[in-house]
Amino acid sequence: MTSKNSLLDPTPFTLGLQGVRVLMVGGNWAAVEFLLRQGALVRVVDSQPDAGTLALAAEGRLRLDRRGFDEADLDGVQLCVTAPGLAQAAAEARGVMVGALPAASRRTGRASLVGAGPGAADLLTVRAVEVIRDADVVMFDKLIGSEVLALIQPGAQRIDVGKRCGRHAMAQSAINALIVRHAQAGRHVVRLKGGDPFVFGRGGEELESLRAAGVPTEVVPGITAALATAARLGIPLTHRGASRSLHLITAHGSDDRLPEHDWTALARAGGTLAVYMGVRTLPLLAARLLAAGMAPDTPAIAVENATLSNERRMPGTLAGIADAVAAAGLEGPTLVLIGAVVALADLAADQDSAEEHLAA
């Protein structure tokens, strides 16, 4: 039998819980996380807490007592969430509001590897927006802009794992382990990555770890820098009579040196070359292509912060692009396009109006 103080329907919990002291007897991660999202101050009493509740306690988001219920636990409590039994009876006797969340509220943990695109929030896919808004935990890179991060719900945990000054805030192996741990605790973990997760983003390594741990994983593609940059400049990456192939390469190896590519094959292909992470090694890359037979006057352009209001464009040729980039002192993420189609770029492509739109 339920007293007038009982509250068995979880729906009302969505209102008026900011700063409310809540006691939960018998931890259920999904129920605990639900209360935390509403701003409640949660204490859990449970002799055998689940992995998710243990993780929340370790992060300092709640107080956890690993034992059975004691009536003194109700001191100062405004709401008690529990199954019918001793704790419910004690709470009702004290006039404490009682609530019960169904065991079915527990969620299966999962992960989403989400491409955030080149930077502009309005270039996110619809699916990416939906997934970000549904996340319990978001692990994001340095290059993710504030407009994209604003899509994260207030109750979700944010973890910055971005690279700074040539060093990672967290080793890739640690990132992989952290995604798995949060997912196994029953959370929806979003790994938010610039561009596309599978284009020089180490998404494949993260997916392998998640698969090995048996974690259900969704991959949400994003607009990679080569596509976004070309679109901004009106460059067709493939074009009949000018380019019948597109090659995406990185100029940054694991040891910060230029990786070895088949330079002769790239020079002879006659297609469009999109170079990622190439600012530091661009002089050597250009030298390799020239030595392999690519024409010195091949059109080239370097674009820093493509699609953002602080975008900068450095046009030139294969022979001179490295000097142009060095003189400009580019420091932001920069993509270099090399090939005949670059000559079709509209460098005055209404950049001012585009910047005003992106900055608005």
Image (cartoon, rainbow, N blue to C red):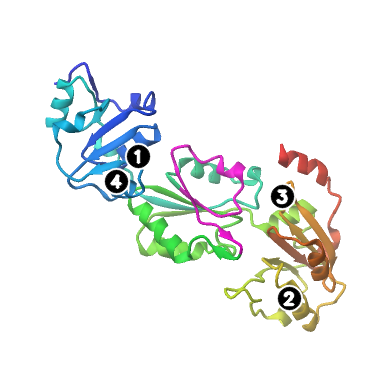
Magenta segment boundaries in residue numbering: 138-165
- Between label 3 and label 4, give the one nearer the viewer: 4
Earlier sequence position, callout 2 versus callout 1: 1
In which quadrant is the C terminus drawn? Answer: top right
- Between label 4 and label 2, give the one nearer the viewer: 4
Q: Which mark is residue 285?
A: 2
Does the stretch in magenta take in 153? yes
Residue ID at (80%, 57%) = 313
Q: Determine which residue is flagged by label 3.
A: 307
Residue 11 on image: x %, y %: 34, 26
Label 3 element class: loop
Q: Which mark is residue 53?
A: 4
Kind of residue at badge 4: Thr
Q: Within the image, what quadrant is residue 350 found in?
A: top right
Residue 173 on image: x %, y %: 44, 66
Q: Determine which residue is flagged by label 1.
A: 33
Residue ID at (54%, 45%) = 127
Q: Are marks 2 and 3 in contact (CB under 8 Å)?
A: no
Q: Is residue 348 above or below residue 281?
A: above
